Amino acid sequence: MTTIDRSRLPEVGPDPAFRLPDVVRHQLANGLQVRTVEHRSVPVLTFVVQVDGGTGADPAGQEGLAAITADMVDEGTGAMNALDVSDALARIGAEYDIDVAPDATVFMLTTLARFGGRGAELLSDLLLRPSLRADDFDRVRQLRLDRLRQLKDLPPAVAERAFLRLLYGGHPYGHLALGSEPALRAMGVEDTARFHAAAFQPQRTTIIVAGDRSHAEMLTLVEDAFGGWSAAGGDASLPAAAIEPTAVAPRMASSSLSESRTASAVAAVWTLACIENGARPRRQSKPLRAP
């Protein structure tokens, strides 16, 4: 039997070998950028679709439009409703998620490699041909309004909202992805349709595929699912990151919560923003484009 001397640290061995996988760049005829990464350790495929334009693309007075449009994508496509979409994802063991950042909206789907074709096809149907039904919009909007009311009692959420407003002012980065109650109440499903038509364009999109397939096979999956996506004008407006923020003078601000509605005592939060005079803040998105 081997004995181990636990009174001493083990000897330091050599550093394990590590090599980043190759990232191969492609571009489809419709302008869609594609990146493929072979990763053979597990038999899964992950699709990451990054559409240029996030919360910073919300029009003035329509804060939250990008995020609610992203939420509407998986509410149905064609004859499928939200439950049908959920069932279709479950049948291929897929995990689906979205992330709305300041400068990009990201959709992610992971499934077993043998279901890669069906996963890419389903993702294409959702992104390119969402149903955008009025009853679904009303339900999703109400959920977001309810969430905004909940956040009023959460000190971290109150602090973040105040901090963004103080730091960025009227800049497109100066609001939460969730938006505001007045903006959401004024929106209609037709607003999400217009935003989708303008922002969801192949020339504004990058798809990254990583997993247990060759580069050629992954490119074929994307071509089959997204190759017929045609550009229809879209919005070529200036990205929010290129808009110069207004200089903010040094100041201190406070934001407090009223008495808590829970059984606990009074809760208060202080947001202290000491901003260097002449500072030019930049809010960073999650970088997903391969080099």
Image (tube, rainbow, N blue to C red):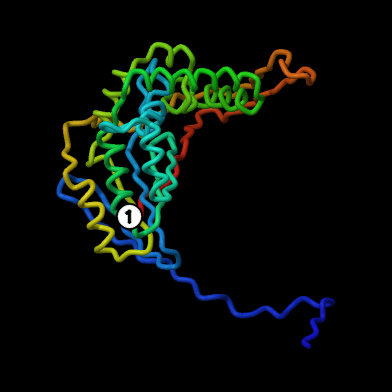
Q: Quadrant of the C terminus?
A: bottom left
Q: Quadrant of the N terminus?
A: bottom right
Q: Say which of 47 and 286 sits in front.
A: 47
Q: Say which of 95 and 195 sits in front.
A: 95
Q: Secondary structure at mark 1?
A: helix
Q: Residue at x 43, y 12 (%)?
A: 185
Q: Amino acid at mark 1?
A: Gly
Q: Is residue 208 left or right of residue 170?
A: left
Position of residue 97 relative to residue 144, above or below, is below
Position of residue 205 relative to residue 156, above or below, is below
Q: Residue furthest toward the bottom? A: 1
Q: Residue at x 52, y 22 (%)?
A: 165
Q: Residue at x 26, y 62 (%)?
A: 217
**Residue identified by numbered label 1:** 116
Q: Is residue 266 left or right of residue 171?
A: right
Q: Say which of 68 and 123 sits in front.
A: 123
Residue 237 lies, in percent from the top left, at: 26, 29
Residue 231 lies, in percent from the top left, at: 17, 37
Position of residue 261 relative to residue 70, above or below, is above
Residue 256 lies, in percent from the top left, at: 68, 17
Q: Residue at x 70, y 13 (%)?
A: 258
